[in-house]
Image (cartoon, rainbow, N blue to C red):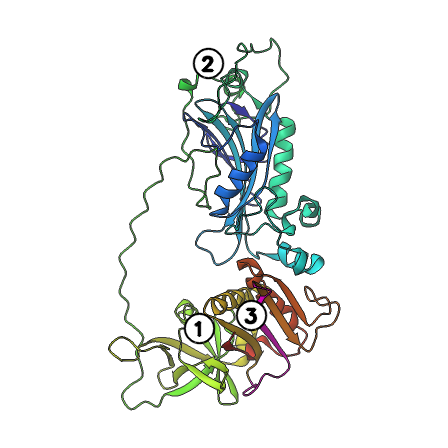
Amino acid sequence: MPIAFDTTGWQQHDRATWFNPGNGDQVTLSYFDLVPDLPASLDDLPKLRHDLAVVVGEVGCLIEAHVVRLGDVPALLQVVKVPLPNQPSGQVFLGSFTVPKADSSAVLKLQAAERGMTGMREAVLVAQLGFENWVMPHPYAPEVQGRLPFHAGDDPRFDPQFADHPLSRLRAWAHHVVRTARVDPRFAALPPFRPATQPPAAQPPAAQAPAAQAPAPQAAADTGAADTSADVTGPTSPADFTAPPTPTPPADFTPPGESPAAPEPEPAAPEPSNPAAPPGPAVGSTLTTVVPGLPIGGYLPLWVGEQCTFWRMSDPEAVLDKLGLGALARTPLTDRRFRDLVALDASSATITLLDRYRAEDGSTGGSVVRLTRVSGQEAHQALTTDTLLDAFRRLGRISLAAAERGEHVTLEPGTHNGDLAEPYVLLAVEEHEGRPVATARTAPPPPPDTPMWQGTAAVTAPATRESVEAGGLLAMYAMNTWGEHPLRLCLTFGPR
């Protein structure tokens, strides 16, 4: 392999892959016998940064890009964030060193994914910095509106405050690589990469390897205990290198400069076992229309009139796929305030999720989900830090969906059954001077020490996916000051 790097503390998975057993971070070392797909040479850093920001913005955000030196060899360092695939929240941070040559490249990459409780770095820093200072134009390409925003929370000055955050770990690893990694001198002497539109520069004569070298760091070896000197020295020509297979990464994005290998075929989905559907209401059953509360930890509150009852969901995803997303039938509180509505059959312990809109043939559809009636004590015990965060992050996604269909959402006690009244948090996207603005308003105003609110009754920011979804955490912190149990709250919708 052309790059040698320090593998201390890493467990080797195969010849080209290492894992950190403590946090799951993964390092891969790859050689590509292809012309690099970089949009500019390392000599034109402004264009390289701009074009990389544009490309990466389609799937995430380029946090930073620099030309660094591994030993005496220039390399491109990229730090990228992309959404966690197949997850409602969370990010993967990718840091890659690319040593590009005219017809090949070597890439050393770390990927560090958020695990468990995600978004805490952002939540804490938004409270410190304020929403108005959070999202910024991209410094390399101000016109780019990426899938993930460029924001103040990714600044390296905050890494010491969040030493175990994946972005902080990635930067610490990158600094160590710059200090300790080396590039095989024969690979380093190959002609440099030049884009097709850039004229070739005169090449210096091939450098000869020094007669004596400093001890090389541990590098890509077949086993962790093997002598790495052969790998450090490297083959004499690119044809002698073999691109190793790399495991499928958690992120479905490859930074520019790293040519992706052919993807592994997806395994065939197993045939469903076709379990019996839950029995619906029997003929003659009495259905009661009820208002669902805020689901937390697999439990669903149902308001039967003024009484709040508690139920454990057998299929939470079937409920969460419709609840709060504009898909269910509604009941009005006023002519501009509405709540979701479901039909409860207590005898069969099921709810029917009634579709909001009629089918083309005029019929009204719905799906049936089985529930189990539980005590308030059991439901309350399901409330933990993780389940509470999950519920309020979902509220942020509900707010985004509401904004996309021209509505706002209010979090308030289920006992509110008329006009807007305290306490509440209202989340909306509004127009201000011709631009969309994410707004969170609450009453009563939270105490000055409330995270994110800082004693104000309203928080605004330019409307991005991230700033709108952050309203869920704002609502959680405001709710914590009310003295109301989260399972006794409801969501109310209204036009923008």
Instruction: Please name whichever residue, 136 or 338, is drawn nearer the observer in this view of the structure.
Output: 136
What residue sits right under mark 2 in the picture?
236
Q: In which image quadrant can residue 93 be found?
A: top right
Name the element at disc 1: loop
Q: Are marks 1 and 3 in contact (CB under 8 Å)?
A: no
Disc 2 residue type?
Thr
Magenta stretch in the rendered image: 415-434
- Element under disc 2: loop
What is the C-alpha distance between the residues marked 1 and 3?
Answer: 18 Å
* In this view, the mark in front (1 or 3): 3
Question: What residue is disc 1 on?
Answer: 323
Visible residue check, residue 348: yes
Which residue is disc 3 drawn over?
A: 428
- Vertically, is 227 above or below 495? above
The crowding category of the residue bearing disc 3, from other C-alpha atoms within 10 Å (few below 14, some 14 to 19, many at least 20), is many
Q: Earlier in the sequence, mark 1 or mark 3?
A: 1
Secondary structure of the residue carrying tag 3 is strand
The disc, 2 or 1, on the residue closer to the chain's N-terminal end is 2
Q: Give the Cα distance between marks 3 and 2.
A: 62 Å
| Amino acid type at image mark 1 | Leu
Answer above or below: position of 69 versus 465.
Answer: above
Q: CA distance from mark 2 to mark 1?
A: 62 Å
Question: For the residues carrying marks 3 and 2, which lies nearer the camera in this image?
Answer: 3
Image position of 238 with respect to 106: above or below: above
The amino acid beneath tag 3 is Ala
Q: Residue 350 location in percent, x, y?
A: 37, 80
10 Å crowding of disc 2: few (<14), some (14-19), many (20+): few
From the viewer's perspective, tell me whether residue 14 is left or right of residue 125.
left
